[in-house]
Image (cartoon, rainbow, N blue to C red):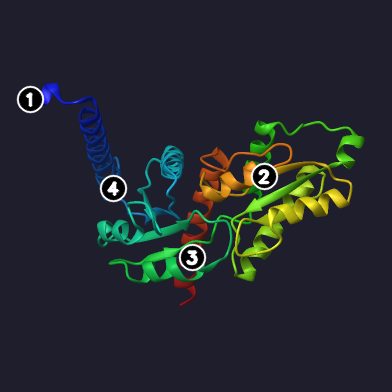
C-alpha cells in the first residue's frame, strides 16, 4: 500500500505526527532567535517554564494542559514553555527535565494547594534534574483563581444580579479533589472565603476523596440552613473522574473545571515570576 493510500486512521496519525514535528522545529528556531538581540549580542537566557500537571486517564485533561500551555506562550512569546506530568500522561516530568539538559527551569505545579505532590513528588523530581530546577508555589489560593471560578459559574448559569430573597436561599459548594495534608485544606478554605466575598453567599469546601466533608454532607449542611439553591463550583484544573462525579451530584448547576481560562495563564506566569524573584533575592543575600 502506498503512502498516498493510507487508511484514514493511519493518515490521521501521520498528519498529527507531522504537525507535532513542525511545531517542535518552529519552537526550537524561535528559541534560538530569541537569544540574539537586534545588536547581535547574546541575551541572558531565562529559565524555562515547565507546567507540571498531575495527569489523568481522561483524555480531556491532556488537551486542557496543552491549551493552557498555548495561552502562556501567547502571553510571553520569548519564554520557553514545556509540559510534564507527575503520572498517567506523557511527557512525564522527569523526561521533560531530562530533555532540557543543562537548561535551568522553574516548575509551576498546576495544583491548587499544598499537598504531597507539591511538597514531596515534584521537589524530588526537580532535585534529580540535570540542571537547576526550582519549584514555584502551587496556583492556589489566589484572587485570579477566584476570577476563574466566578466566570465558570456565570457560564453555568449563576446570576450576575441576585435579589435579596434569592440570595438568602443560595450557596455554593467548592468541590475539590481532597488531600490528607492539612495545609491543602487550609488553602481550599481560603479560596472558599475569597469566592464567598465575591459572590455574597456562603461557600463551603467539599472533597471528592481523602478529606471531609464530602459533597453530600456539605449539601445537607446547607439545606439545614435554608440554602436550597446550591451550585457546585468545580475546583479542578481539568476534567477528570472526580470533577465529573462532583458535577453529577450538583442539585442545581455545576461549573466547568478551571481549564485554560485566560486568568489561569496569567497566574502561571505570576508563579513563575515569583519563583525567579525569590531565587534572585536568595542569591543577593547569600
Could you tell me which secondary element the residue under label 3 belongs to?
Answer: helix
Separation of marks 2 and 1 at Cα, in angstroms: 52 Å
Residue at x 27% of width, y 37% of height:
23
- Residue depth check, mark 4 versus mark 2: number of the one nearer the observer: 2
Q: Which residue is mark 4?
A: 35
- Which residue is labeled 1 in the image? 2
Mark in the foreground, 3 or 4: 3
Q: Earlier in the sequence, mark 3 or mark 2?
A: 3
Q: Is residue 193 visible?
A: no
Q: Mark 1 or mark 3: which comes first in sequence?
A: 1
The reply to whether discs 4 and 2 touch (Cβ–Cβ < 8 Å) is no
Residue 90, x across and y down, in percent:
33, 51
* Left or right: residue 84 compared with residue 1: right
User: Along the polypeptide, which appears first: circle 4 or circle 2?
Assistant: 4
N-term-proximal mark, 3 vs 4: 4
Identify the residue at the far top of this view: 5
Q: Which residue is mark 2?
A: 249
Measure the C-alpha gap from mark 3 to mark 4. Answer: 33 Å
**Residue found at x 88% / y 51%:** 225
Q: Earlier in the sequence, mark 1 or mark 4?
A: 1
Q: Is residue 165 left or right of residue 135?
A: right
Q: Nearer the viewer, mark 1 or mark 3?
A: 1
Amino acid at each position: 500500500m502506498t503512502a498516498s493510500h493510507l487508511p484514514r486512521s493511519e493518515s490521521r496519525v501521520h498528519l498529527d505526527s507531522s504537525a507535532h514535528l513542525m511545531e517542535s522545529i518552529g519552537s526550537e528556531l524561535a528559541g534560538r532567535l530569541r537569544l540574539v538581540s537586534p545588536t547581535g549580542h547574546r541575551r541572558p537566557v531565562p529559565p524555562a517554564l515547565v507546567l507540571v500537571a498531575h495527569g489523568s486517564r481522561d483524555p480531556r485533561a491532556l488537551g486542557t494542559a496543552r491549551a493552557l500551555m498555548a495561552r502562556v506562550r501567547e502571553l510571553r512569546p520569548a519564554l520557553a514553555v514545556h509540559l510534564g506530568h507527575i503520572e498517567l500522561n506523557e511527557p512525564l516530568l522527569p523526561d521533560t527535565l531530562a530533555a532540557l539538559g543543562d537548561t535551568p527551569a522553574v516548575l509551576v505545579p498546576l495544583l491548587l494547594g499544598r499537598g504531597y505532590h507539591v511538597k514531596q513528588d515534584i521537589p524530588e523530581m526537580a532535585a534529580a534534574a540535570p540542571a537547576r530546577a526550582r519549584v514555584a508555589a502551587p496556583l492556589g489560593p489566589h484572587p485570579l483563581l477566584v476570577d476563574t471560578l466566578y466566570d465558570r459559574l456565570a457560564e453555568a448559569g449563576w446570576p450576575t444580579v441576585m435579589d435579596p430573597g434569592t440570595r438568602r436561599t443560595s450557596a455554593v459548594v467548592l468541590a475539590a479533589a481532597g488531600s490528607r495534608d492539612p495545609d491543602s485544606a487550609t488553602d481550599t478554605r481560603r479560596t472558599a472565603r475569597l469566592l464567598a466575598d465575591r459572590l455574597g453567599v456562603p461557600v463551603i469546601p467539599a472533597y471528592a476523596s481523602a478529606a471531609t466533608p464530602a459533597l453530600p454532607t456539605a449539601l445537607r449542611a446547607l439545606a439545614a440552613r435554608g440554602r436550597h439553591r446550591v451550585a457546585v463550583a468545580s475546583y479542578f484544573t481539568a476534567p477528570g473522574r472526580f470533577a465529573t462525579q462532583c458535577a453529577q451530584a450538583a442539585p442545581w448547576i455545576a461549573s466547568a473545571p478551571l481549564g485554560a481560562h485566560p486568568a489561569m495563564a496569567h497566574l502561571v506566569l505570576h508563579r513563575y515570576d515569583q519563583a525567579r524573584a525569590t531565587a534572585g533575592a536568595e542569591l543577593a543575600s547569600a
